[in-house]
Image (cartoon, rainbow, N blue to C red):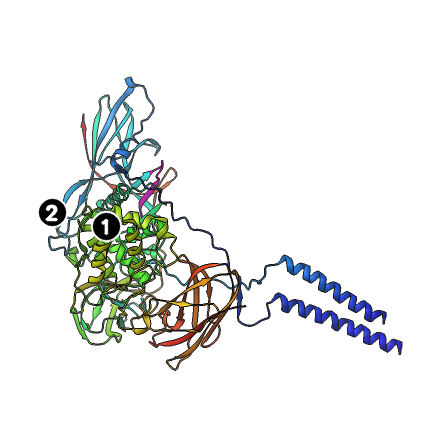
Amino acid sequence: MYALYFCIKSGLSLLAIAALLGCMEKSVTEFPTPIKSIQSTKTAKPGADIKLVSNALIAIMANELAHTDIVLETMESSGELIIEFFPSQGLSLKNTSTPHVIKFDSSAPIKIPVSLAAMTNGRYYLNMHISLNNMDSISVRNLAVIVQVGPLAEQAVKLQKTVGENIIVLPAQETISSQ
Amino acid sequence: MRGVLAVYSKRFCLVCIKCVCVTLILVACGGGGGNNQTFSNSTSGALGSSSLSSNAAFSLASFSSANSSVSSSSSADSIVLSGIITYDHIPHNTNNVGLNYSKVEPRPVRGAVVELVDESGQIKASTATANDGSYSFITQKNLLIKVRVKAQLLNVTAPTWDFKVTDNTSNNALYVLEGALVATTTQSAKRNLHASSGWDGTGYAAPRAAAPFSVLDSIYVGLNRIIAAGNKQGLSPLELRWSTKNSAADGDITKGEIGTSFYDGSAIYILGDANNDTDEYDPHVLLHEWGHYIEDELFRSDSIGGDHSDGQLLDFRVAMSEGFANAFSGMMIDKINYADASGIGQSSGFTFSIGRKNRLNKGYFSEGSIGSILYNYYASNINKTANDFLPIFNVLNNTKYSASEAFTSIFLFQSQLTNQFPEHASMFSSLMQEQNIFGTDEYASDESNNGGLSITLPVYKTLIVNGAAINVCSTADYGKHNKLGNSQFLKLNISQTGVYNIRANKSGGANIISKPEFILYQKGRAITYVENTLNDNVIGNLNIPRGNYVLEVYDLNNHDSDNTDENMTCFNVRIAAN
């Protein structure tokens, strides 16, 4: 009986302590939930309603003809796309017409097969100049796909340091005369 | 018996303690079920006060010349070293498409930091160029020094600013133009420095020294206009990151793979990839991005960012921000035709009239409509001075705009404009109606243009505590993340601080697993985000102080660009006091 009494007394004491502690806590306990950053604050310059939805980076081997699809997407329901391809120096574009003219009448993805080759390892770019005519206006956006040939090489950054400041010196055309 | 009783007593005691503990835990947990979160106190953002002076005719150039400093020396040992700093400006063609290299002209580098530097790299004196590009030092005779011009606008006394043009492919190093290390003589001298474009007639064959100073000059112009409109608030330091490697490839920024010219809340990145896309000579592009920075610094923007273009039907917060930035770019240089050069030899590109009124998809969700309204208002001389930025500045910089409980939108702008400039109200209302915008207050009451989606009206629904459920739908008909119809907005008044249960349960729409979520805002600031953890449902118990709020509800499927499905899903939204 004493044990039972002790038990109840202990329980009530615990309850009292817990209640006191509860009064000191907030009325709703925090369940830590990471507040996901759902807002992208990146604002881009105006341009045609066209974006790249296939991989922004393609990896290929040197001296290999690689076939891939460039996939573009627009929310325009109809119109005409004119795509001009400009591979960077050292990258070759094969079997692909440029300019590439596409008339579309839905917002389905636009797939363009391309074949690419490079002789040496390095990082190249397949640049695309895109003009979109949606029958209301003509707008332009430039896109590019990164073509990594072979392993990624770390690039050395040359800096001219001066006292306490990180600067890049541009050459001036200077004229000096007496006042 | 006693022993048995003792054992059972002991067991009962342990059970008793366990029960008490469990009870305590349950009480602490609020009874379980759903997501339980506290309502965190938001800290106010530094949006700036609106202490505007009506006679703030402040000249940036005159302020610069007051900064002239000298190296210490006696007059007998001193000479005057002065000069003019210029850069190659390349205009657009008269049809606004492409750059015209045949019309290159030297223009003054204005407001830039100029230093005298000795042979050990020590800075002997510092000043800033005036409005005509001139600088002047009093310095020692027979001193081996060079003139260095920084691509930097700097003001260290109130209102402060610090704008630098740096190279993101070289650890954000600051661009500087330097002359030769030459000894001063016993006579005063002139040292003029010119930054060349590097163009040799067919291409860029030399360092493009003018480019950073062209970027800087667009900011100088904008800064002057902001100050002339009455701004006295200091601006946060900002880097404008430009490189000849900055290209349309979207990857490693340190390699120049910036994707496009953009502002990300911390810096502005600018394209410089010759024969593909360069923006250093496109002031509209530069001032569009700087306009977003000014929104952050001096005004308020609730935009959620993302892809956008004229003609798209956007979340109205995005439409307002992008429309404003387009209009701002035209206002700052008084050029209605936006021009962005690109292509081989920078000879092509595109242009559009910011003030164009005839367009497809007019409405409060169109950045083209917003830009047109704001620019035409700016340019109007009906009961106002034409091309005067001051009224727009006053509306946006006012605390009533920045502290509004409604989201930033063209509706909020019109509401505040009507209060501050009632004599402009009729003209502005006409501009709105020409763009098929009919809302009558900051909550778009009476708006009738649904953009082809009936679910979008009213623009703000009203959710009442312990009231009937409000049905809302989320769709990706016009694209994902930041398009009209992705989210729905509900006004919410909390009359008594307390714990409230908010839930959204799927009520219809496409036969898919939906992922409803909601965000609670106060005065445009996201206070609490309740993410989806249950199929077709989202529930949150929030401790909400008394006040007015806006609840944004959406299906995460329609905010996720990786999800290629386009579906409409609908939800019943309720709020109940606990």
- Residue at image point 40% right, 71% down: B556
Q: Residue B423 shows which numbered tag?
A: 1
Residue A66 in view of the camera: no
Q: Are marks 1 and 2 in contact (CB under 8 Å)?
A: no
Q: Is residue B480 above or below residue B126?
A: below
- Asked if residue A144 lies left or right of residue B509, the reply is left
The image shows residue B55 at horizontal and vertical percentages of: 27, 37
Residue drawn at x 16%, y 64% is: A138
SS of the residue under disc 2: helix
- Label count reads 2
At 34% across and 62% down in the image, what residue appears? Answer: B443
Residue B195 is at least partly visible in this image: yes
What distance separates the C-alpha of mark 1 from that of mark 2? 43 Å
| In the image: residue B94, left or right of residue B47 | left
Neighbour class for label 2 at 10 Å: few (<14), some, many (≥20)? few
Chain of the residue where label 1 is placed in the rendered structure: B
Q: Return the residue found at the far bottom.
A: B511
Magenta region: which residues?
B155-168
Tag shown at residue A64: none
